[in-house]
Structure formats: structure tokens, C-alpha cells
Image (spheres, helix red, strand yellow):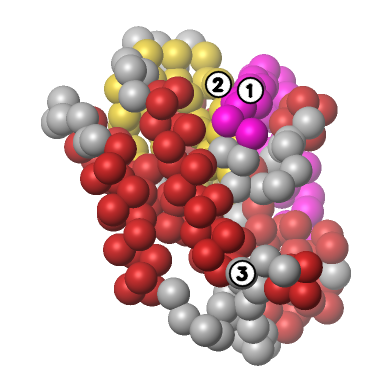
Amino acid sequence: MAMYSNSKISTFETCPYQYKLHYIDKIEPEITQTIEAFMEDLVHQTLGLMYKNKKFKKRVEKKILIKFYRDLWEKEYSDDILIVKEDEGLKADNYRKMGEKFILDYYDSHKDDDMTILGLETQDRLTLSDGNQWHVRIDKLGCKGDIYFVCDYKTNARIKLQEEADSDRQLAMYSIWVKDKFKDAKKVILKWHMLAFNKEIISERTDDQLKALQQEVVESIQEIEEA
């Protein structure tokens, strides 16, 4: 049995040959990271610090978070990170400042959130009905009583539309794992934090929808393995 993920299946759906190069031949692209991906990773780490402290009922001041973010940037940034929009006049510093704004806006909106944090950047696996495994990596998993929240941080420059959220495979598959692990879960809310807009997009799935989704995933995996 093999391990699958949303990105793995999406790659095959986009281009089977690209899937072969990446997952079978293990050929790494010449450009390993873009400035958008770099900034997003550092924002994730910074918000993670905010919630790690919150577990111990300790509030981290904004200035501490921003210092943490800037120190990470200083330590990890390198000139081989690709700035796709450099010809439009954008520099690395523009993206650094964007990330700072995302963090500050999020902090102001969520500093008083009473959600119980169950996991950050969770690493687990869901066993599918065909015996294969599904990789579960949730940015933020929390609950308020028997209501559970699967949260994803997005730094995209385009906001996610409601119909896209309602058909999203990634977080919906994670909700199957949540319902399997936490038997008291009466409801699992899927939440995308659209950091560039300081907005949240929310969706939810019925048990029947999740059952149908898992079958679709199993059929997609079968198609990949047959190829």
C-alpha cells in the first residue's frame, strides 16, 4: 500500500507525465522554491508560535511575532529563491512586508479566540477503504466543545470562492480523519484563513458527501496505479 495526498492526486490530474517525473523518477526541478512559497512558510511558522504559546495561556505580543518572523527571514532567505514578478518591480522586501501585514491582521482578528488548539501542522495518516494511506497535515486543528475546526492558512493573492471551498478535496478528506479520531465530533468546520484579505471562508460536508468523496479518491488512486 502507498501514501497519497491531495497534491499528489492533483499533480496527476494536471499532468500524468509531471506526476511520473516527480513521484516515480524523483526528478527535482531546477527552481526549488518561489518567494511566495518561502513567505508562506515563514508566516505559517510565525502563527504557529502564536498558538504554541496560547496553549500555555500565554499571549505573545505582536512585536515578538514580527521579530520572530524578521529573524527567520534574515536567517533563511537566499538569492536563489525565485521572484517570478521581479520584472514587475517586486523585490523580496515587498513580500517580507506583505507577510508582516498578514501576521498583524491575523493577530488582531484572532488574539481573543477561545478555540482549544489540538494540533499545529499535524502529521498523521488516514487509512482509505482500499487500504492505501492518505497524508493528513493540518495547519491548525481546534475545537469548541464538540465542534471541530480544520483550518488552513492561505497567502494567495486571489481569494477562494465559496463554491471552490464547497468542492475542496484537501480539507474535506482531513475532516474524515477528524471524525475517525475524535468520536465526540458532532460537526467538523472547514476554514480557510485568506490572509491577504483578512477574511475566512467556511465550508462543511455531510457524512454522505464524505463517503462519496473517499470513493472518488479511491477511484483516482486506482487510475494512477493502473497508469
| Dot in front, 1 or 3 | 3
Residue 88, how many percent across, how many down? 78, 68
Which kind of residue does numbered mark 2 sit on?
Ile
**Residue that appears at 51% across and 54% down:** 97
Q: Give the residue pinned by disc 1.
A: 202
Q: Are marks 1 and 2 in contact (CB under 8 Å)?
A: yes
Magenta-colored stretch includes residue 204:
yes
Asked whether residue 182 appears in the rendered view, the answer is no
**Residue that appears at 31% across and 32% down:** 118
**Left or right, 116 with reference to 193:** left
Residue 82, how many percent across, how many down? 63, 77
**Main SS category, magenta section:** helix
Q: Are marks 2 and 3 in contact (CB under 8 Å)?
A: no
Q: Give the residue pinned by disc 2.
A: 189
The answer to which of marks 2 and 3 sits earlier in the sequence is 3
Mark identifier at residue 91: 3
The answer to which of marks 1 and 3 sits earlier in the sequence is 3
Residue 198, how many percent across, how many down? 58, 30
Looking at the image, residue 127 lies above or below residue 94:
above
Looking at the image, residue 174 lies above or below residue 7:
above
The answer to which of marks 1 and 2 sits earlier in the sequence is 2
| Dot in front, 1 or 2 | 1
Question: Gap in Å between the C-alphas at discs 1 and 3?
Answer: 33 Å
**Left or right, 41 with reference to 171:** left
Looking at the image, residue 124 lies above or below residue 90:
above
Question: Gap in Å between the C-alphas at discs 1 and 2?
Answer: 7 Å
Disc 1 secondary structure class: strand
Q: Nearer the viewer, residue 113 or 116?
A: 113
For the record, the magenta segment spans 197-224
The quadrant holding residue 31 is bottom right
- Crowdedness of circle 2 by 10 Å Cα count: few (<14), some, many (20+)? some
